[in-house]
Image: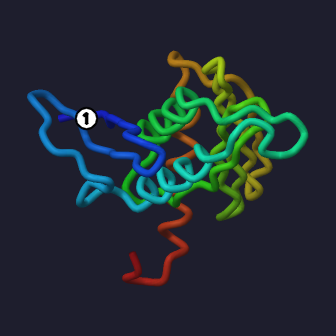
Amino acid sequence: MSSSLAYRIDSDDEVRIRPVGPGPSTASEPEEPGAPAWLARTVRAIHELRLLGPNWDTRGASALDETAMLLALELLHGAASRDTPPPDVVPTVVGGIQLEWHRSRMDIELDVSPDLRAGLYWLDRESGREWEGPLTLRRPRELAEVIEELTARTVRARPHGAR
């Protein structure tokens, strides 16, 4: 059974996450029990960035766009697995958000702009393969494949038995 995530931003102090499936949903908790570690860490980082107002860089940067934040989370949720390492979360000066991984000889950058355009860049430093382009609803496979490879490398690199 497939589920998606619902994000509710209740106030400046709280972001609630809950899986949404068929049927009514009741309580929502800040962190769903059994949720992947990347989810809680990523949501906390995004929540902290929400507190940045306009001109947060003292050079005229826009405040973070809430819809761009939610789209970035939805894209990550659709591509990541339980063992995916959490990304670094970076605001962009135009009000967008960038999720980045620089590990396991891979560089991955997912950029979501306030106009809800998503771009993906990845470099596999083992093979030398590189790709950059738009990420569309017709082409989410590119993100899923590169995140899957990053996750597999990260899991293989863990000490035996570590989680």
Q: Is residue 3 left or right of residue 156?
A: left
* 20 to the left or right of 37: left
Occupied quadrant, residue 109? top right
Quarter residue 2 falls in:
top left
User: Which residue is at the front of the view, 137 or 69?
Assistant: 69
**Residue situated in front as seen by the camera: 25 or 121:** 25
Residue 150 visible here: no
Q: Position of residue 83 (x, y in %)?
A: 42, 60
Whether 27 is drawn above or below 120: the answer is below
Q: In the displayed structure, would residue 123 be above or below residue 160?
A: above
Residue 115 position (above or below residue 8): above
Q: Is residue 72 visible?
A: yes
* 62 or 3: nearer the viewer: 62
Q: Position of residue 25 (x, y in %)?
A: 14, 35
Left or right of 135 on screen, residue 70: left
Position in image of residue 99 (x %, y %): 63, 46
Residue 53 x, y percent position in the rendering = 69, 40
Q: Give the labeled residue for mark 1.
A: 3
Determine the secondary structure under disc 1: loop
Q: Amino acid at mark 1?
A: Ser
Residue found 69% across the figure and 48% down from its top: 90
